[in-house]
Amino acid sequence: MVEPDEKHRLARLQDRIDAAKGAQAPRPRSDEHYSQAQLAWRMVIELVAGLGIGFGMGYGLDALFGTSPWLMIIFVFLGFAAGIQTMMRSAKEVQEKQAASAADEKEGHDGN
């Protein structure tokens, strides 16, 4: 049978072991590089989608009206411009989020 004093010692030892394991446990990795890659892919997809939609509309209208490459060329440029505009809007949105989180962190450090 284990004496109460020995139980207390074993409990303290177990607490120390748990604390040591917690200190050596790997910390969760930041997902920052994943979010940056996700942002880059999002922008590429937005640009390609704009080009694809412009190409499709121009090609369809060219086939409908028989104006060969002219409407396709015009709509590819319009799709490219729309893709760039969407990319810029996404970049601005991300920049505003980062500025807001930086301001929140600064407030948190100032409050301490």
Image (cartoon, grey):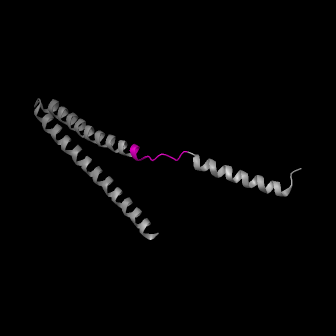
Give percent across and percent down for residue 106. 39, 64
Task: Decide which of 84, 31 is in the foreground and name it.
Answer: 31
Give percent across and percent down for residue 63. 16, 29
* Residue 84 drawn in magenta: no
Left or right? Give the position of 90 relative to 14: left
Task: Decide which of 110, 71 is in the foreground and name it.
Answer: 110
Outermost residue, right direction? 1
Give percent across and percent down for residue 69. 12, 30
How many marks on residues? 0
Outermost residue, bottom direction? 111
Give percent across and percent down for residue 20. 63, 49
The structure residue drawn at horizontal position 22% and vertical position 34%, both measured from the top left corner, is 56
Task: Decide which of 45, 107 is in the foreground and name it.
Answer: 107
Left or right? Give the position of 61 relative to 112: left
Query: Within the image, what quadrant is residue 73 found in?
Result: top left
Q: Is residue 100 above or below residue 60?
A: below
Query: Within the image, what quadrant is residue 78 found in?
Result: top left
Left or right? Give the position of 25 relative to 109: right
Magenta stretch, main secondary structure, is loop
The structure residue drawn at horizontal position 36% and vertical position 42%, both measured from the top left corner, is 37
Q: Is residue 93 above or below residue 74?
A: below
The structure residue drawn at horizontal position 43% and vertical position 65%, both measured from the top left corner, is 109
> What range of the chain is rendered magenta?
26-34
